[in-house]
Image (cartoon, rainbow, N blue to C red):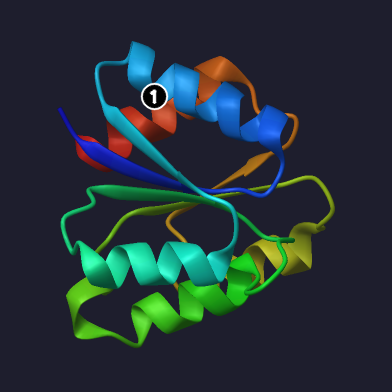
Amino acid sequence: MAKILIAEDDPISQRFVATIVERMGHCALVSPNGRHAWEAMCAENRFDLLITDIMMPGMDGTTLIRTLRADPRFQTLPIVVMSAFIGVSEISGLLGIGASWFMPKPVERSVLEDYVKRALG
């Protein structure tokens, strides 16, 4: 069983992603924004995967990814980004700063399951 942190401010998306992760047999923890996710990562450096939205209050997903990748403890952590409001150049930029995969919103269950399996594989 893997520990997966979900950084997402939308309650519906939080529940949807957490439910899928838990049905896959993993432990899902939800953070309502990037700042909270960063603090959770620092408090417990034992997450196997981060799934993060980009547009969040407090600290957005882009800043969260940059902050994580600047810390040696999190340089190899798999990161899945989910967002509805970005284009190809923004996706390329996110992959360039350290995101592992991108999935569009609304999230499709099969795509999420595939990325989780690849990240933990």
Residue 120, percent from left and from top: 22, 38
Residue 14 visible in the displayed image: yes
Residue 31 relative to residue 29: left or right = right
Q: Label 1 sits on what residue type? A: Val
Crowd around label 1: few <14 · some 14–19 · many ≥20 (10 Å) = many
Residue 48 relative to residue 89: left or right = left
- Residue 75 position by quadrant: bottom left
14 is higher (above) or lower (below) than 82: above
The quarter in which the N terminus is drawn is top left
| Secondary structure under the numbered disc 1 in the rendered image | helix
Q: Residue furthest top?
A: 23
The quarter in which the C terminus is drawn is top left
Residue 102, percent from left and from top: 58, 48
The residue drawn where x is 63% and y is 21% is: 108
120, 44: nearer the viewer: 44
87 is higher (above) or lower (below) than 22: below
The residue drawn where x is 46% and y is 18% is: 20
74, 34: nearer the viewer: 34
Residue 54 relative to residue 73: left or right = right
Residue 95 visible in the displayed image: no
107 is higher (above) or lower (below) than 36: above
Q: Residue furthest bottom?
A: 70
The residue drawn where x is 81% and y is 57% is: 86
Residue 19, percent from left and from top: 47, 18
2 is higher (above) or lower (below) than 73: above
Q: Which residue is mark 1?
A: 21
Residue 91, percent from left and from top: 67, 61
- Numbered circles on residues, count: 1
